Image (cartoon, grey):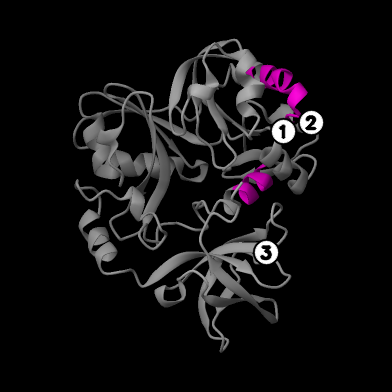
Amino acid sequence: MKDTALSSTHEALGAKMVPFAGYNMPVQYEGVNIEHETVRTSVGVFDVSHMGEFLIEGPHALELIQKVSSNDASKLEIGKAQYSCLPNDDGGVVDDLIIYKLKEETYLLVVNASNIEKDWNWISSKNDVGAEMRDLSEDYSLLAIQGPKAVEAMQSITSHDLSAIKFYNFVVGDFAGVENVIISATGYTGSGGFEIYCKNTEVKQVWDNVFEAGADFGIKPIGLAARDTLRLEMGYCLYGNDIDDTTSPIEAGLGWVCKFNKDFTNSEALKAEKEHTPENKLVAFKLDERGIPRHGYDIVDSSGKTIGNVTSGTMSPSLGIGIGMGYVPTVFSKVDSKIFIQVRKKAIPATVVKAPFYKG
């Protein structure tokens, strides 16, 4: 089990540590609901240093990225980021990722921790154009500083105007006494904030300065359990749950990051699928009665026939009701459609809704 550069810091703070994607990670500190509420109302900090970072450089960097990713990376300018996915040859998804344009001919790809080796091998196998690739995953740390007070709380530790960094934009500069830090207005919570990329040797200084700067704003460390409830309230896909090697990005509602003005892996098949409506779709749903939908629970119709399964589910801390996502036949995917979630021996009625669940 690998440690992040901050594992001992989390342990000293009393975090409950669990194995996650091969890393020893903090799942919670005070409790999921308290930590969730902190991010929704003030500011919290996640250590997500287990994520992977690949540098793709050189005159053929964009050519490789365009070939393996579904979105149109040619639209990126320096200082902008883009959500995308890596389709496989069989209609599924190798991973979802964020692509940053650092300089002309230099891109940073940020991938899921559990997929670092798989993604590296996949992209390498497609690199017949001679792009330069470097895996920085073992050397870099990532902190997600999230919540509506993030800008105000962090402004004192950087010379950059944080309020001027728009969503999915970033700057490279000074932060918490460290130079050449990526300060990115991204995150997976829906409550605003930043993601901070720095070297492992620098992250303890950054962490300490972040908590000192945020002390008057009620800043708290946040574990991965609250990260999951926060992203689910936004209807954001989690790789391994809602998308994987067998799920189509079209079925998953990720058609918006599939740009068919270019050729990419399996693009012809995905384009045809989009034009002819997929057989199944990933839907968001709310339970109409008390209950908690969990990953793997069956979704059934009014006659009790299994029509799908829950890919992500929880009791929403913000809304106080059971919410979830799952794949169902397209005929059941319209908003206000009635489905049922099999919670043990009871089929609990649920209503298909439009994500996000949490509107802020």
Secondary structure under the numbered disc 1 in the rendered image: strand
Q: Is residue 110 above or below residue 21?
A: above
- At x 23%, y 54%, the residue is 267
Q: Looking at the image, which residue is at 19% across and 47% down?
A: 261
x%, y% of residue 320? 73, 59
* Image x and y of residue 47, in percent: 63, 33
- The answer to whether residue 222 of the structure is visible from this angle is no
Whichever of callouts 1 and 2 sits on the residue coming sooner in the sequence is 2
Please say whether residue 245 is visible from this viewpoint: yes
**What residue is disc 2 on?**
13
Element under disc 2? loop
Q: Quadrant of residue 106?
A: top left
Name the disc covering residue 221, or none: 1
Give the residue at x 31% y 31%.
76
Magenta stretch holds residue 102: no
Vertical side of 305 occupied by 134: above or below:
above
Q: Position of residue 348 (x, y in %)?
A: 66, 77
Q: Which mark is residue 259?
A: none
Residue where numbered disc 3 is placed:
322
Residue 324 appears left or right of 240: right
Highlighted range, magenta:
206-230
Amino acid at pointer 2: Leu
**Numbered disc in front, either 1 or 2:** 1
Specify the amino acid type for callout 3: Gly
Disc 2 to disc 3: CB gap under 8 Å: no
Numbered label tally: 3
Q: Is residue 323 left or right of residue 166?
A: right
Which label sits in the foreground, 2 or 3? 3
